[in-house]
Amino acid sequence: MNNGPHKSVINRAQGPGGFPVVVLEHASGYRLTISEYGGQVLSWIHPSERELLFVSPTAFFESGKAIRGGIPIVFPQFGKGSLPSHGFARTKKWKVVREQVRQDGPVAVGLRLQSDHSTEALWPYQFALELDVELSETLLIVLRIMNTGSEPFTCNSALHTYFAVGDVAQCHVVGLKGLSYVDFLNGRARCIEEGSELSVPGAMDRAYERSPEALAIHDRDRLCTFKITKDGFADTVVWNPGEEGAAALSDMPAAAWRSMLCVESGNVESAITVLPGEAHVSAQILRAEIQQ
Ligand code: TA6
């Protein structure tokens, strides 16, 4: 039972760039904003009014361009390749297909994206994606990838979460010890994570393979711990562009590299194959614990 002073409610609004957004408010005081463009969570606010996700102050909010921050949906390709970087799902307009407001449970919204001529011109398969976002004292995101065609397809998927941190150099990630990872900043060298706490003092771009269901990010600067629980996402990507990398991005100030850390649940090194008529379901739960 929610005993918070707030009421659970869902509102529609116009977000940055005029993109329609859905705003979820939960009785616990947590709030969330999701953009229909990209099906992208843009804001997740703690009851203390602290923003928990990073969105670049110079992010683009223009059709056809990816929004730098929040929780971009990566599909059907991770990273660079024959398709636009991280695929096309994050630059398409999704449709709100479900809203659920309960005073004694999560507030939820469902969005859907299905293949069309524009996607089939890029990637010749029929699919439907459904994204379920449930806000309570945690943030649950479920991604269903359905094969609505007659041919099997193989794809990547990821929730490319940009966590807001005080100073990334004072953060570390726990749960990766002993895992094999691909180091994208070192010619895709395969290495083994030796440490029980991964510090991110600067640029880093690694895909940890077959990572555990539970990981944590400890932000010693803002006295905040993010707990990540995942299912159906085999890998975890840890990315920070560093100052030079951020300076090379047209939608991120150089100094902003310190204020974010991407820890992404994904099927990156382990692509997924979906047979006709079948669906692949993956989920991630985020919890923020702030030491008051
Ligand atoms: O998730 C890490 C990564 O693949 C990095 O290599 C970097 O390219 C980042 O994603 C951001 O990609 P984007 O296409 O959003 O600029």
Image: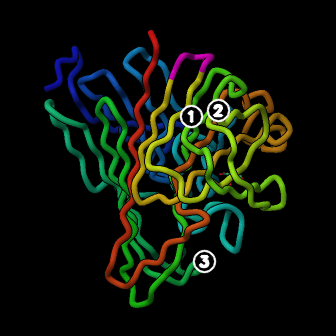
Q: Which residue is drawn at 31% across and 21% down?
A: 29
- Asked if residue 179 is positioned above or below residue 251 in the image, the reply reads below
Distance between mark 2 and mark 3 Cα atoms: 31 Å
Which labelled disc corresponds to residue 260?
2
- Asked if residue 29 is positioned above or below residue 19 in the image, the reply reads above
Residue at the disc numbered 3: 122
Is 58 positioned to the left or the right of 12 in the image?
right
Under mark 2, the amino acid is: Met
Distance between mark 2 and mark 1 Cα atoms: 6 Å
Q: Residue at x 71, y 70 (%)?
A: 81
Is 271 positioned to the left or the right of 205 in the image?
left
Q: Which residue is drawn at 58% across and 81% down?
A: 121
Magenta-drawn stretch contains 221: yes
Q: Is mark 1 within 8 Å of ligand 1?
A: no
Marks 2 and 1 in Cβ contact (< 8 Å) = yes
Distance between mark 1 and mark 3 Cα atoms: 31 Å
**Residue 103, quarter of picture:** top left
Residue at the disc numbered 1: 163
> Which residue range is magenta in the image?
220-224
